[in-house]
Amino acid sequence: MKFGQIILIAIVSIFISSCATTKLAQQGHTAYNNGQYSEALTAYEQFIKSQAGKKSAALDTVFFKAGMACMELNKTELARKYFEAAEDNQLEIPELYASLAKIYKGIDNLSMELDALEHYNATFPNGKQINEINGRLFDAYVESEQWVKAQELWPSIEETAGNDLKKLSGLFAVYEELNKVEEGDKLAIKILK
């Protein structure tokens, strides 16, 4: 066989293989969009396996979508694995960090949850979940006794917090810990009304 024929066969094989793996990703997306999460996860996992050792934007998206399918199937630990793989591959979308924060909260890992919340807050200040993220970030700062950070974040959630007793109690704890007596007294009166 001539060298040119060998090259041609190799190129055709690569092209066919590439089309087959792209089809797997598309099958996963279609199944996911149709609410068939188990089928989507199977297709995504086959695609991921076929891409072992490679880096691509398609792979990053498939990791994320596989994580979302796992969330729908209540496979939290597997979802975490896929979301973290997407993050490791530099996928930067707000939904990834919101999902990671939710998982870390669910497994009671406050430090990792804080990392995901802070990343969302800093990277996606206009993200569609920013109010929810900032509200949870405030609560996490209070839980972790990061009083100054909680106080600095408060103005961005004050309007949406409204009369939420948990948020107001958290703010009261912030004022108390930072020796802001006057602000604490005013807030106590508001809480007691």
Image (cartoon, helix red, strand yellow):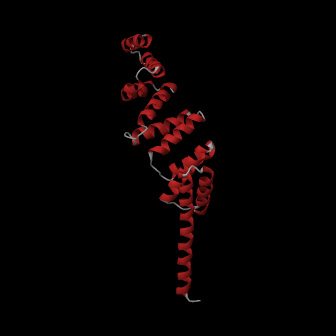
Figure quadrant of residue 148 = top left
In this rendering, is residue 143 above or below 46? Answer: above
Nearest to the observer: residue 131 or residue 149: 131
Q: Is residue 20 left or right of residue 176?
A: right
Nearest to the observer: residue 42 or residue 32: 32
Query: Does the rendering let one see residue 154?
Result: no
Q: Is residue 119 left or right of residue 72?
A: left
Residue 82 position in % (x across, y down) = 57, 49
Query: Does the rendering let one see residue 181?
Result: yes
Q: Residue at x 53, y 50 (%)?
A: 64
Residue 79 position in % (x across, y down) = 59, 46
Residue 166 position in % (x across, y down) = 49, 21
Residue sitting farthest toward the bottom:
2
In this rendering, is residue 180 above or below 81? Answer: above
Q: Residue at x 47, y 21 (%)?
A: 170
Q: Residue at x 57, y 70 (%)?
A: 17
Q: Residue at x 54, y 69 (%)?
A: 19
Quarter of the picture holding the C terminus: top left
In this rendering, is residue 75 above or below 16? Answer: above
Figure quadrant of residue 45 = bottom right
Figure quadrant of residue 129 = top left
Q: Is residue 102 left or right of residue 150?
A: right
Quarter of the picture holding the N terminus: bottom right
Residue 85 position in % (x across, y down) = 55, 51
